[in-house]
Every structure is written in structure tokens, then in C-alpha cells.
Image (tube, rainbow, N blue to C red):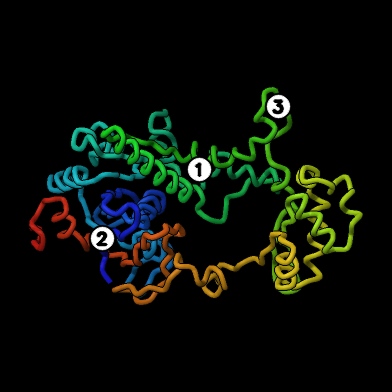
Amino acid sequence: MTGGQGGGGPLAGVRVLEVGSVIMAPYAGKMLRDLGATVVKAEPPGGDIGRRIGPLGEAGTSALAMNLNAGKKSIVVDASAPRGEAEMRGLIAWADVIVTNMLPRRRARFGLAWEQVEAVNPQAILVTGQGFASSSDRGDAPAYDDVVQAASGLADAYRLRDGAPRYSPYVVADKVCGMSMAQAALAALHRRHVTGHGCWADVPMVDTMAAFTLVEHMGGETFEPAQGTVGWSRVLAPEHRPHRTRDGWVCVMPYTDANWERFCELLGRPELLNHPQLASNRARSADPQMYEEVLAEYAAERTCAQIEEECGARDIPAHRVTRIDGIRDDPYLGGRPMLTTAEHGREGGYVHVGSPVEFGGIPRPKPADCTPPDADRAEVLAMIGAVPAGSEPE
């Protein structure tokens, strides 16, 4: 398998330059490549540090890089050298979209400040992402995922439930902000289609994650004067969690009033329909402790399969908790085209995590290798017109 062009997805023909590291910008690049774009990954000497984080394959490729960089073309660019400066200008001139998570002070050194990009390629779309807004006095402050969770209020949501702030058990800020970078790129591509002009879109992580958190947790402080405190009580109840069954864990969620009525029939407990803490969706959400206790009692007496069968027959949402280490064997996820077993040229077999999005009549890009740093130099230079196709650079 080779690095390959972008596939036949809806972004076929779109040219993306990714100048990023670890997860956020590489995740944005992955999303755009999964949609069919051709993505060139420009890396510093030594390569993106994300290639060396976490478990490594026998040939030294990290599990993180195997999927984040699949199908991208790699070229190492030393922007401090004259040749590197020329290569970066050529890449900027070639690109439709540029995604980077470099801090503003570093972007200028790579020719990636908007004024520099616009001078080389007025139709380019530059999407930048970093902890704080580029235009703010904190634009150059370093901020990793945990810092962003702390600064945005996301970590504090755990305090509202558990009494102390916590970090999410996954790099939620990097991935949500990577998705926002891809979304911004798509919006800017449409704007360019209408106006003919490129533009700069800045995706500050703290702002993005604050907006993400406040959708529901702004709560009663949405109104002026306030009509209550922050937080959404239904999801902040300590009891709001998967419930133990006889053979695992389950989510059972009779959410609407119609769901609840059918659930009470299933329990044989019609008196619950008139209980003041349970009689309506609003009551169950405002004070969910008793509601969750009823669900816990129901789950404890049954297996996951029994619950799925009973609730499924009554259109009550329910599903056993899928273990991450069991996803490949899951009857639903294990058969989805998003998750495929692929063959890597250097690492052998691996699990490829592709795009979850399906477009009718448009084939999804096939899995492709994560190539080593600079492995695609000659091809990339030929693409941007720096050397004839098939020639080796000096």
C-alpha cells in the first residue's frame, strides 16, 4: 500500500497543507483527507512528535500516527534554511487550505502569518488553532489539552457533579478543536467559491471548548436576570451513569414521557406515573435521583441482553456499554466501514479508523499508509512544481 492521493470523496481535488503536531491540526488534516482531499504534511526535521507518542509498532510508528497520518504525503521542511523557506513558499502557493496549530510567534517564522500567506497565495485559506485567540494578549501562551479543559470551564463541569474538577479521559479539546478547524476550512472554501477570495480563520481552543461546554451548562444564567444556576441537572446527578446489570453495564434511558409510560408498564408500577419526582420529563430532569434509582434497580435484576430485548420491543432507548477493547467484535461497530483491518507497508496489519461519514453514491477513500517523515519528498516537490516528476532532489 502506498500513501496515495486523496480518494474519491466529496473533497477530491482539494489541496491541503498541514503544518501541525500531535493531535489538533493533524486531526483536522485527517478529517479533510478522509473526505477526499489530498493532504501534504510538512514536518520539521525529526518529524512530528506525535509519531513517537504512545504505543509503537515494530517498525517504530506510533499508534497515534498510524491513523492520524494515514494517506497523507510527508515532506520534512527546515524553515530555518534557504531551501526550506523556498519549499514552504511553494507549498503555500500550491495549497487551497492550510491548517496549523503553531503559535502566532512561530507561524511568522514559517511564512504562515496571514499577511505572508496572502502575499504568496491570495486564494489560500489559512486555518490556525492554538490555546487562546491569535488577536488576544495570550495568543502566544502555550496550552495543551489539559490546560484548555481547565481554562474553558470544561474541567469544572466535573466539579458540579463530583465536587472537584477533573480532566476528561480523552483528549477532547484537541479533537473537538480539530473538528472545528475542519469545519472552518469547509466554510471558507464555500466563501471562496462565492467571492473568489481566500481568508484566515482562527480557532482558539479555549473559546471553542467554552462554547462547547456552555451549550447546556450555561443553565439558568443564560437569562438576565438569572433564572437559576449554571449546569444542567439531568447530566450532573451523581447517579447519572451506566447501571450495573447481572453481566455487565447498560444505558437505559426512558427519556420522553411516552418512553416513561411504557417503562412503567414494563415494570408493572403504574403508580410511578403520578409520583411528583417522576411524572414528567421536566420533573425527572430537575431532580433525577429517584429516576436513576428506579433504573438501577431494574438493571440489577437483568442481563444486558434482557434489557435490550425488553426495551427494544417498547421503543425505549437502551444499549449495553461497549468496551473499547471489544469494539472490533461488537455486532454493530465491528462491521462498520469506519473500522477496517488494513495492511501497512512497514508495520503489517493494523486497525484503521476512518471517517464515520457516508455519502450516497460517493466511495469512501481507502485506507492508506502513514509514511515515514520525508518519505514523499520527491512526489510532493513534483506536485508543487519544484522538480520534475520522478526526479530526486539534491
What residue sits 80% from the left and 43% below the top?
283
What residue sits 32% from the left and 66% below the top?
368
Please name the residue that numbered disc 3 is placed on.
Answer: 226
In the rendered view, does 130 fall on the left or right side of 17?
right
Q: Which mark is residue 5?
A: 2
Q: Amino acid at mark 2?
A: Gln
Seen from the viewer's position, the closer of residues 363 and 51 is 363
Q: Is residue 346 above or below residue 128?
A: below
Q: Amino acid at mark 1?
A: Val
Image coordinates for residue 151, horizontal then vertical, percent: 53, 39
Q: Point out the frontmost of discs 1 and 3.
A: 3
Image coordinates for residue 246, horizontal then vertical, percent: 76, 73
Q: Is residue 96 above or below residue 365?
A: above
Q: Amino acid at mark 3?
A: Ala
SS for callout 1: helix
Q: CA distance from mark 1 to mark 3?
A: 27 Å
Q: Which mark is residue 148?
A: 1
In the rendered view, does 388 fall on the left or right side of 152?
left
Q: CA distance from mark 1 to mark 2?
A: 34 Å
What residue sits 58% from the left and 50% below the top?
167
State if disc 2 and disc 1 touch (CB < 8 Å).
no
Whichever of labels 1 and 2 marks the residue nearer the N terminus, that label is 2
In the rendered view, does 111 fall on the left or right side of 134?
left
State the image quarter where residue 114 is shown. top left
SS for callout 2: loop
What residue sits 49% from the left and 39% below the top?
208
Residue 236 seen in the current view: yes
Image coordinates for residue 110, horizontal then vertical, percent: 24, 41
State the image quarter where residue 378 is shown. bottom left
For disc 1, the neighbor class at 10 Å (few under 14, some 14 to 19, many from 20) is many
**Direction top: furthest residue:** 225
